[in-house]
Amino acid sequence: MNYRAIGCGVIAALVFIGIGIIGLNLASGRVGCPERIQWRELSYLPAGTPAPSPAFGVKGEPTKLGSTFIGLTTRDIYGPPGSRTSTLAADRPSSIAMDCADGTFLSYRLSGTVPTLSPAGSP
């Protein structure tokens, strides 16, 4: 038996597993909300400070518009009551809120458009 080869294999396996654990920790350990949200060609910037629930200053329940991935986690996106998702920028809400994964929600306001890599005619 070649103990040197076995030892090198064990060390290589431990290094591989260690790097994998560190990578998963970095990818899934992000708590808090990003500095900017891009929804296709629209860009949203934070407005205010995190709150215990999505707030839009209007009466009614916030509408869940969908979710997005940040690292390996999924975060819910909410819009004002009655809002809906749309492929047309003109139909999207001017303010949205995101679940920050720490029990708070941060509101974002439309800041403008940004170039996208997707063709304009795609859904």
Image: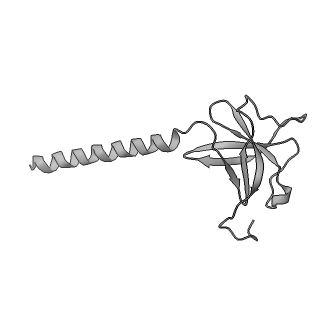
In front here: 16 or 37? 37
Q: Residue furthest right?
A: 59
Q: Quadrant of residue 58?
A: top right
- Residue 62: x and y, percent? 82, 38
| Colour scheme employed for the rendering of this structure | one colour
- Residue 86, compared with residue 6, is above or below; it is below
29 left or right of 68? left
Q: Residue at x 50, y 44 (%)?
A: 27
Which residue: 81% across, 59% down?
89
Question: Along the horizontal axis of the image, is 123 left or right of 19?
Answer: right
The residue depicted at 65 percent of the width and 67 percent of the height is: 117
- Determine whether 42 is above or below 101 in the image: below
Q: Quadrant of the C terminus?
A: bottom right
Q: Is residue 105 left or right of residue 12?
A: right
Locate residue 122: give its quadrant. bottom right
Total number of numbered labels? 0
Residue 60 on image: x %, y %: 89, 35
Whole-percent x, y for residue 84 in the image: 83, 50
Residue located 55% across and 45% down the image:
72
Give percent across and percent down for residue 108. Answer: 74, 43
| Nearer to the camera, 98 or 112 | 112
* In the depicted structure, whether residue 41 falls above or below residue 84: below
